[in-house]
Image: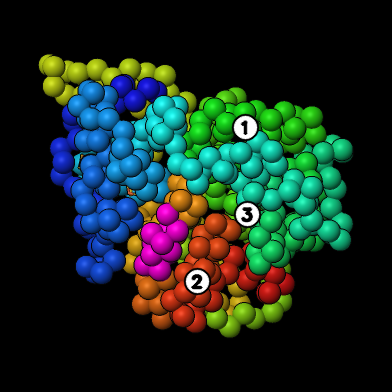
């Protein structure tokens, strides 16, 4: 939807600032009550959802133009979606997340993208990954694994490793562990190996809509050639792209995150735990698996006003308020591992604080990105947990880096690693 179509929303934003906090009935302490990393870090209203509505309105009315400050205001948004949940729960049925995405698209289309992001797009065109690494090494993480390559064979279940897990040598073992566990559970899973391409989710969040669509169509064509019916991924960004964005371009494959699939296999007793993992852990909900992990609901309606004042949608518009994201499967898995004790942080499920790696922020604003991760590590430490567990390699990477910089002994794991320790 073009940015101008959000004009009524820009006027309807009441400037109430609920979007800067988790809903007040969820607040447990002042220390962990905020929800928006950008306004918390930059401490200036323009860096909030409310402020970005005002900036966008000024731009579309021609009252202001582009500047380095405007670019920073737009691209420091992690598109984590926390403001969106708070606005919907506490205030109006506005779409601040969709609006800021459109704002990013507009800046990129007008040649106002960031240099750090352009370098990624160039690498993507050349090597088909966001890690600026050679395409030829994409499948190396699976060397020695007895798993079929669906680039040349047919198969119904495809494990998509994603850019981060394919190339980050410190994290690759969790991709290998996931495939290993699926195979031991009798699942006939395959991979694309060297032929796997970026899902496009991260470049979409940076504002590169057309490039995203190109990768989405290429991936869907590759799946169709291989006869794929189910995609499984351990990457929350990939999950969101496949589950929420691809259906808008016609995809009909089933999408599962690894934690959803593992929870099902554990329940069916196809994966059985034999070993204890004595550890107190806390779980971080990745934004794109949690509040943004809700399934796509098609809507082709119109906005109307009753008596020129009350806004209604015909037919009723889907309301993505984060409540239907993937929250229970990872917690069920953790509670079922012998020896693991799960203690919760203050901001959880749809009210989770972002890891700081989203929206192209890790690549363009590293200090702010690491501060955001550090805030979450402080919240994890406050629970008394000895390990922070998550289900996305981007979160894991950012947390590991921040814990190292902070000198904190907090261990960081992908959930799959704990499952593998227990079988
Ligand atoms: S909560 Fe919604 S209505 Fe209130 S200031 Fe934020 S974006 Fe505007
Ligand atoms: S998406 Fe996240 S970073 Fe962006 S305005 Fe909303 S809460 Fe802040």
How many neighbours does mark 2 have within 10 angstroms: few (below 14), some (14-19), or many (20 or more)? many
Q: Quadrant of the N terminus?
A: top left
Would you place residue 361 above or below residue 279 in this image?
Answer: above
Q: Which residue is label 1 attached to? A: 216
Residue 319 inside the magenta-drawn segment: no
How many neighbours does mark 3 have within 10 angstroms: few (below 14), some (14-19), or many (20 or more)? some
Q: Residue at image x 55%, y 50%?
A: 236
Q: Which residue is label 2 attached to? A: 388
Q: Earlier in the sequence, mark 1 or mark 3?
A: 3
- State how far apart marks 1 and 3 are (Cα): 17 Å
- Horizontal relation, residue 46 to residue 241: left or right: left
What segment carries the magenta color?
365-376
Q: Which residue is label 3 attached to? A: 164
> Which numbered mark, 2 or 1, is in the foreground of this view?
1
Residue 159 in view: no
> Which numbered mark, 2 or 3, is in the foreground of this view?
3
Q: Earlier in the sequence, mark 2 or mark 1?
A: 1
Q: Position of residue 111 (x, y in %)?
A: 44, 30
- Where residue 419 sits, quadrant-wise, is bottom right
- Horizontal relation, residue 208 to residue 216: left or right: left
Q: Secondary structure at mark 1?
A: helix
């Amino acid at each position: 939807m073009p940015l101008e179509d959000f004009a009524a929303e820009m006027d309807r934003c009441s400037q109430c600032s609920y979007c800067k906090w988790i809903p007040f009935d969820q607040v447990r302490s002042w220390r962990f009550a905020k929800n928006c990393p950008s306004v918390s870090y930059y401490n200036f209203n323009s860096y909030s959802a409310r402020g970005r509505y005002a900036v966008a309105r000024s731009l579309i009315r021609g009252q202001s133009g582009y500047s380095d400050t405007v670019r920073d205001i737009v691209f420091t948004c992690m598109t984590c979606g926390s403001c969106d949940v708070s606005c919907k729960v506490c205030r109006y049925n506005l779409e601040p997340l969709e609006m800021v995405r459109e704002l990013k698209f507009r800046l990129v289309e007008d040649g106002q993208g960031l240099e750090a992001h352009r370098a990624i797009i160039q690498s993507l065109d050349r090597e088909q990954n966001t890690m600026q690494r050679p395409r030829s090494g994409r499948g190396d993480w699976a060397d020695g694994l007895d798993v079929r390559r669906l680039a040349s064979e047919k198969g119904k279940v495809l494990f998509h490793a994603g850019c981060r897990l394919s190339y980050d040598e410190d994290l690759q073992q969790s991709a290998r562990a996931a495939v290993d566990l699926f195979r031991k559970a009798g699942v006939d899973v395959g991979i694309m190996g060297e032929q796997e391409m970026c899902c496009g989710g991260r470049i979409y969040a940076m504002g590169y809509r057309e490039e995203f669509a190109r990768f989405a169509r290429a991936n869907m064509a590759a799946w169709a050639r291989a006869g794929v019916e189910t995609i499984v991924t351990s990457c929350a960004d990939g999950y969101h792209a496949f589950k929420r964005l691809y259906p808008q371009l016609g995809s009909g494959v089933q999408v599962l995150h690894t934690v959803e699939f593992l929870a099902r296999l554990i329940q069916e007793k196809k994966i059985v735990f034999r070993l204890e993992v004595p550890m107190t852990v806390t779980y971080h909900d990745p934004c794109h698996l949690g509040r943004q992990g809700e399934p796509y609901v098609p809507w082709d309606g119109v906005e109307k006003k009753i008596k020129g004042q009350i806004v209604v949608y015909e037919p009723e518009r889907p309301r993505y308020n984060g409540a239907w994201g993937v929250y229970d499967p990872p917690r069920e898995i953790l509670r079922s591992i012998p020896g693991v004790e799960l203690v919760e942080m203050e901001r959880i499920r749809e009210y989770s604080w972002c890891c700081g790696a989203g929206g192209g922020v890790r690549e363009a604003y590293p200090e702010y990105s690491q501060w955001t991760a550090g805030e979450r590590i402080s919240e994890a430490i406050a629970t008394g947990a000895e390990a922070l567990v998550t289900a996305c390699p981007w979160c894991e990477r950012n947390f590991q880096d921040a814990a190292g910089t902070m000198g904190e002994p907090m261990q960081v794991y992908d959930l799959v690693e704990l499952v593998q320790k227990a079988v």
